[in-house]
Image: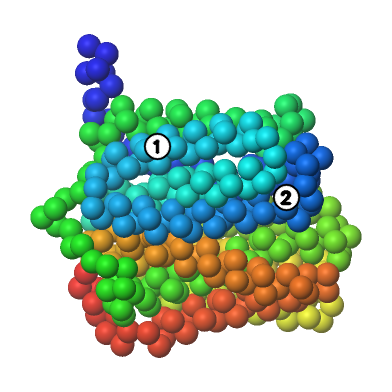
């Protein structure tokens, strides 16, 4: 009786929420832990520089995990892999809470990032199977809306958890939530679409990369989101350092930006149906470029007022909201059935572009806003150039695929 109850089918909405929760956990692995980083050298020994490796190791592990799960997902049951991913993420989160030294924590964080990347790889394929037809892009928009709240809310939750039980509390929270998500994924696994051998085309990573349509949409998506994340990752240091603002000012900037992103991303699919997918991707990307160029112009002239920056930042976020969900969907469609590898490549590119842009702007972060705005503007411009220059037949092929 109990076993039967553990294998019942549930609605796509429930499964969508479960999938979203899994991807949010992977994101929270950075943002929830962020407030605890300054306390780690005192608690575990080591230097502040080594404590920063706690973040870098997680990012490195995530990159390895994305490519690994992308390969495994094309060969084995994604339902089982999802449960294993969440279960091992829970185990490594628990072990991290009891790490004896900072060096051990860095090692465990690499493993935690690798194991926690599974949901991000499998989510597009699951959503594509749960919502066939033109409903999938709108669900990608909702997923993006849910995920976008994590960088804004998780650091606040992490700061609260620090006051409750120290740096370990964030890891214990991640472990507990991952266990719940793993149990739910196992209990309702029959409601998740699994590998459909007759419909899937298995390819190598290189064959997908050589596909002009995938390269066009995948790179454009990665550069577009990368431009947003480069700005977000550097903004706290600029605001609290060079500009003498507070973290509350950063939260204010984020709240307004995320609010418009959520509105735009949920309208993205409806706009695409009315005006055309390719047109809206182009309009969104062009508006993203415009938003960052305006920020660059204002800040390079010495501007620093939030009264001006907030509307400009909202413009960039709204622009990405318009193109983000449908752009990601087009990249998944362009992978021609190999959703796991396609999603892994796109998310890996996002991580790489964000890391590269953040590292490029880091030496100049004490100057003020404009180096950060320049890095984001260049990424957005490259995203637009990808749409213009890569894959001369991409528009026709993408339209035929849909």
- Pick whichever, 4 or 20, lies toward us: 4
* Mark 1 or 2, nearer chain start: 1
Residue pictured at 63% horizontal, 66% vertical: 230
Question: In which quarter of the view is residue 53 placed?
Answer: bottom right
The colour scheme is: rainbow
Q: Residue at x 54, y 57 (%)?
A: 60
Question: Disc 2 on helix, strand or loop?
Answer: helix
Percent from the top left, x then y, of residue 16?
A: 36, 41
Residue ID for mark 1: 18
Q: Is residue 44 left or right of residue 398?
A: right
Q: Which residue is mark 2?
A: 51
Say if residue 337 shows up in the picture: yes
105 w.r.t. 285: above or below: above
Q: Residue at x 40, y 32 (%)?
A: 182
Q: Residues within 10 Å of mark 2 (few under 14, many from 20)?
A: many
Q: Determine whether 76 is above or below 207 in the image.
A: above
**40 in relation to 242, above or below:** above
Residue 144 rendering spot, x and y as whole percentages: 47, 53
Q: Is residue 377 left or right of residue 8?
A: right
């Amino acid at each position: 009786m109990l076993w039967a109850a553990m294998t019942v089918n549930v609605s796509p909405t429930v499964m969508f929420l479960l999938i979203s929760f899994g991807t949010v956990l992977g994101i929270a692995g950075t943002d929830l832990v962020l407030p605890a980083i300054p306390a780690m050298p005192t608690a575990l020994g080591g230097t502040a520089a080594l404590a920063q490796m706690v973040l870098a190791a997680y990012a490195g592990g995530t990159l390895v995990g994305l490519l690994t799960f992308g390969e495994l997902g094309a060969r084995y049951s994604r339902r089982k892999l999802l449960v294993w991913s969440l279960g091992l993420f829970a185990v490594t989160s628990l072990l991290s809470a009891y790490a004896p030294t900072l060096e051990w924590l860095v090692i465990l964080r690499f493993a935690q990032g690798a194991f926690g990347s599974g949901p991000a790889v499998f989510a597009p394929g699951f959503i594509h199977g749960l919502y066939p037809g033109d409903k999938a892009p709108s669900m990608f928009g909702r997923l993006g809306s849910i995920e976008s709240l994590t960088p804004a809310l998780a650091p606040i939750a992490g700061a609260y958890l620090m006051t409750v039980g120290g740096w370990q509390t964030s890891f214990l929270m991640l472990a507990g939530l991952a266990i719940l998500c793993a149990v739910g994924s196992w209990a309702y696994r029959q409601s998740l679409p699994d590998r459909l051998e007759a419909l899937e085309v298995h390819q190598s990573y290189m064959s997908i990369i050589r596909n002009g349509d995938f390269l066009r949409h995948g790179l454009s998506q990665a550069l577009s989101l990368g431009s947003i994340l480069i700005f977000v990752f550097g903004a706290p240091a600029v605001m609290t350092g060079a500009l003498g603002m507070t973290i509350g000012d950063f939260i204010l900037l984020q709240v307004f930006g995320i609010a418009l992103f959520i509105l735009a991303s949920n309208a993205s699919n409806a706009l695409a149906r009315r005006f055309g997918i390719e047109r809206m991707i182009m309009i969104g990307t062009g508006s993203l470029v415009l938003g960052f160029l305006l920020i660059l112009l204002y800040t390079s002239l010495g501007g620093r007022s939030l009264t001006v920056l907030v509307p400009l930042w909202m413009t960039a976020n709204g622009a990405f909201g318009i193109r983000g969900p449908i752009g990601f969907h087009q990249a998944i469609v362009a992978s021609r059935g190999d959703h796991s590898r396609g999603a892994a490549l796109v998310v890996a590119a996002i991580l790489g572009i964000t890391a590269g842009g953040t590292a490029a702007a880091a030496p100049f972060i004490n100057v003020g806003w404009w180096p950060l705005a320049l890095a984001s503007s260049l990424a957005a411009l490259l995203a637009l150039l990808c749409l213009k220059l890569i894959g001369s037949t991409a528009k026709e092929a993408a339209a035929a695929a849909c």
